[in-house]
């Protein structure tokens, strides 16, 4: 795979909905954010419909399916309710993520190895419906091998540990996490899996991940929505796109 192959950017719009829901009403509108992201160069839109509907709502998913011209990556827990919603809408991609009601954000990767049989049966109807199935996992060979065995086409590597260590100035730990992500991206690619990555990425942390030739897509949300407060959403995404492209072309 050439390091010059375009790296896709998926923009997560969950936290536009978080701001909307803080006051109630319809503003700011996540669908408007999704269209701005498209215009700014996003290759896809990511939205996580949580069990407690703390940000994205069912109506948001319906609206996104109607208006988007780029693919929707529907993040969801492995529950019967979410499976039914995904099968009704048939989004381009479904990313299975762990979910705990008490967490502020997704805290780690999905435990695939211990739930292999259950997850294999869970994702089979989604694949049959035409959605690409991605599994959000830690950079761990056991989880990657399990994701491959259950029939996932894509894995998304959790980059949170790397980003946290970098932000907190734990340089050696950040470097070690980056090496782990690099090695596991190579390993997953060798198995025929498409490799994505995301969680906690910012302007300061994105370039080393974007430079990994096996990584085909980065999904970024919270940082971009926060940066949009200062720059505006379109300029914030354009700058992220520039950093990713520069890292890919070096």
Image: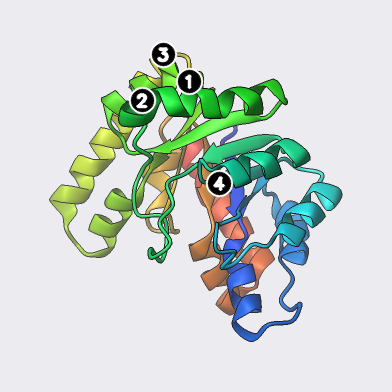
Question: Along the horizontal axis of the image, is 69 left or right of 162?
Answer: right
Earlier-in-chain disc, 1 versus 2: 2
Specify the label residue 144 is tagged with: 2
Task: Examine the rendered structure and indicate whether residue 128 appears above or below residue 15.
Answer: above
Question: Along the horizontal axis of the image, is 105 left or right of 85?
Answer: left
The one of 179 and 102 positioned closer to us in this rendering: 102
In this view, the mark in front (2 or 3): 2
Label 2 to label 3: alpha-carbon separation? 9 Å
Tag 1 and tag 3, C-beta contact below 8 Å? yes
> Residue 61: which quarter of the image?
bottom right
In this view, the mark in front (2 or 4): 4
Q: Secondary structure at mark 1?
A: loop
Quickly name the residue at label 1.
193
Label 1 to label 2: alpha-carbon separation? 9 Å
Question: Along the horizontal axis of the image, is 228 left or right of 204?
Answer: right
Tag 2 and tag 3, C-beta contact below 8 Å? yes
Question: Along the horizontal axis of the image, is 27 left or right of 9?
Answer: right
Tag 1 and tag 2, C-beta contact below 8 Å? yes
Give the residue displayed 23% in from the left and 56% down from the top.
Answer: 165
> Residue 37: which quarter of the image?
bottom right
Quickly name the residue at label 4.
76
Residue 16 visible in the shown view:
yes
Task: Examine the rendered structure and indicate whether residue 121 appears above or below residue 134.
Answer: above
Earlier-in-chain disc, 3 versus 4: 4
In this view, the mark in front (3 or 4): 4
Quickly name the residue at label 3.
191
The one of 7 and 147 positioned closer to us in this rendering: 147
Earlier-in-chain disc, 2 versus 4: 4
């Amino acid at each position: 795979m050439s390091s010059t192959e375009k790296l896709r950017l998926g923009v997560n719009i969950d936290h536009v909905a978080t701001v909307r829901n803080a006051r109630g009403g319809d503003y700011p509108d996540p669908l408007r954010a999704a269209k701005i992201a498209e215009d700014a160069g996003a290759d896809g839109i990511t939205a996580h419909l949580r069990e407690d509907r703390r940000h994205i709502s069912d109506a948001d998913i319906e609206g996104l399916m109607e208006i988007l011209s780029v693919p929707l990556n529907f993040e969801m827990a492995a529950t019967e309710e979410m499976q039914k919603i995904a099968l009704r809408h048939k989004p381009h991609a479904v990313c299975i993520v762990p979910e705990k009601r008490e967490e502020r954000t997704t805290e780690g990767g999905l435990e695939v190895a211990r739930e292999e049989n259950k997850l294999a049966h869970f994702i089979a109807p989604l694949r049959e419906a035409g959605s690409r199935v991605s599994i959000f996992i830690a950079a761990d060979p056991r989880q990657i091998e399990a994701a491959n065995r259950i029939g996932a086409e894509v894995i998304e590597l959790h980059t949170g540990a790397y980003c946290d260590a970098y932000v907190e100035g734990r340089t050696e730990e950040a470097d070690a996490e980056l090496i782990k992500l690099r090695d596991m991206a190579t390993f997953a690619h060798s198995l025929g899996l498409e490799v994505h990555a995301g969680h906690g990425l910012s302007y300061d942390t994105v370039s080393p991940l974007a430079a990994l030739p096996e990584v085909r897509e980065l999904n970024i949300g919270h940082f971009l929505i926060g940066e949009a407060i200062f720059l505006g959403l379109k300029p914030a995404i354009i700058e992220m796109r520039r950093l990713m492209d520069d890292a890919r072309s070096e």
